[in-house]
Image (tube, rainbow, N blue to C red):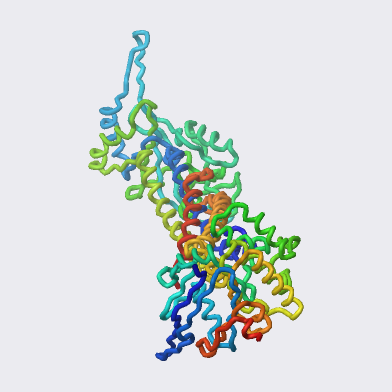
Amino acid sequence: MSILRVENLTKTYSSGGRDLTVLHSVNFTLEPGDTFSIVGPSGSGKTTLLGLCAGLDRASSGSVYLNDIRLDTLNEDQRAAIRNQYVGFIFQNFQLLPTLTALENVMVPLELRGEKGAAKTAQALLERVGLGQRGHHYPTQLSGGEQQRVSLARAFANRPKLLFADEPTGNLDADTSSTVVDLLFELNREAGTTLVLVTHDMELAARTQRIIRIKGGTVINDRMTELLND
Amino acid sequence: MAWRDSRRSRQRLLLFMSAIVLGIAALVAINSFGDNLAQSIDDQARELLGADLVLSANDSTKEKLFYPLLDKVAPTTSRKLNNQSLVVTSPYEYTREISFASMVSFPKSQGVRLAQVKHLSPGDYGGGGSNDYPYYGEWQIIPQSAEKLWRSNLHRAPKTNYALVDDGLMIQFGAKVGDSVNVGGTSYKIIGRVLKTPGQSAVTTTVAPTVFLPFVAEGLIQRGSRVNYKYYFRFDTDRDVEKIAKRIGPALEKAGVSYDTVEGRKKQTGRSFADLTKYLSLVAFVALLLGCVGVASAVQLYVKEKVTSVAILRTLGASGRQAFLIYLLQTALMGLIGAIIGALLGSIVQLVLPRVFGNFLPITVETALSGPAILGGIGTGLLISVLFPCCPY
């Protein structure tokens, strides 16, 4: 059973009476545990594709199957429930809730699904990312790298089957990026999560098993990384 | 999560809360005052009238009509004592009050003003005549002994020229106890200043200040004088005065005599002040409405700032209902706190209101916490904190 299947996915925006197609008939399938990169220039439709795969947006045509559940037939709340159950997110801008502490941010996915012992689980995850002592700090009291580590802990809090990372190192310097990426792959390996990575960084993309290249909304290349390396 | 999320935004929510606090404080204060006023009118209804029954006429000859009527419903009883003397017992006692407008002058300051002149005496007919009005409530006179002295002179013959004069009138003309006041051609010595009489507010005495005379000098009332005669009755406690008034009422009205009972005065005063309370409630409601606009604006601003947080929550899997409830609970909680503070503030303010309106009121308003006003205020605050933020803009 595939964890993510994308079939003929097309997204068109209408603006000022004109249609703009940002994704054209994208197809791919991911198996559990796969690591996968979407690369391409700015405005090529990478983030749009990620949003559609995660059920954050609706496609104009085509389908997305997440854990064999067809997302386009579900309403907003049903898709949110699927995200809470199967999906983790890491964003370029970290997207931590500024009013909550680091610990509380990690607790959010667990609390949303009504799990007990959320604080304990969140604390263990913060310790895993090396921020065990910073749980009571607010995001503004943390550096960019620390915020992204909190974000990593939050992403893994609900033990997702699929992790979407949108430019996870886009706002970090080289040293911090390296630490965060190592941690991301480490946690991913430990949890056996499928990783979908959107990035400009070919070096980072090369660490995944498979890369698709998008340009102008069309997949122009879909190859296993080993082949690319060769 | 709602409580935790509000932690860093509470200063902002304070703005929203302050709108509720002020609106609810006004509402609770006015409603509490209204409740206390109604309760005080209820408790002090007899003091408002000073008697059980008051008959009013503009002609002294009407007096002789009362007694046959009263005799039918509350007859006097007589019995022989030791087979010799006859003891007549009346079920009521009464005081006659003669009042008319007259110019009064203060020789010391040479001030002249139109005043209400009043004289109390036992009536000319019937068996229960006295001049002990007010039967309920008290006159507030400085010095206190002046009332006793004045009353004792009502019986003395020849009558001494002692007068009690309204405090406002004395202040206006700089008169002091011991000075004299001239009414008609007669000079009276002022022996006391009257601060308050039952059923009268400071404002009404300002419009028509009263001078109480021990006797009406000859020539003061002449043919054509506009004189009002009031008869204050106190009945034995076992008498149903309302029933008596109902039975003799039609005949009295036919004879041109109006009557007033405790219940009637209670309703009349209650109605007047219910209008005042309604007006004040309207003012409070407008304040609350402005508060509601403040609440809506503050929450709209707050929610706009929270759009990103809502988006994050939705991404992490929060349902629309969960995201909505998080922020609704925050506003409801702040609204509840605001409403409670507002209710407390309103309860404190209502303690001051009787002082503010004291001069307009014929009774002393006893201040007490009004449960319905407080609960109503808290409920209203909670309701507006939940409803107004939901208004689409």
* Residue A16 x, y percent position in the rendering: 42, 90
User: Is B174 on the left-hand or right-hand side of B372?
Assistant: right
> Is residue A125 visible in this depiction of the protein?
yes
Q: Residue furthest top?
A: B82
* Residue B139 x, y percent position in the rendering: 51, 40
Report the front residue among A29 and B306: A29
What residue do we see at 52% from left, 64% from top?
B318
> Is residue B170 visible in this depiction of the protein?
no
Assign the C terminus of chain A to one quadrant of the image: bottom right
Can you say whether A217 is above or below B183 in the image? below
* Residue A139 x, y percent position in the rendering: 68, 68
Image quadrant in which you'd find residue B21: bottom right
Image quadrant in which you'd find residue B52: top left
What residue do we see at 73% from left, 69% from top?
A141
User: Is A204 on the left-hand or right-hand side of A40?
Assistant: right
* Residue B80 x, y percent position in the rendering: 34, 12
Image quadrant in which you'd find residue B307: bottom right
Can you say whether B123 is above or below B184 in the image? above
What residue do we see at 55% from left, 60% from top?
A112
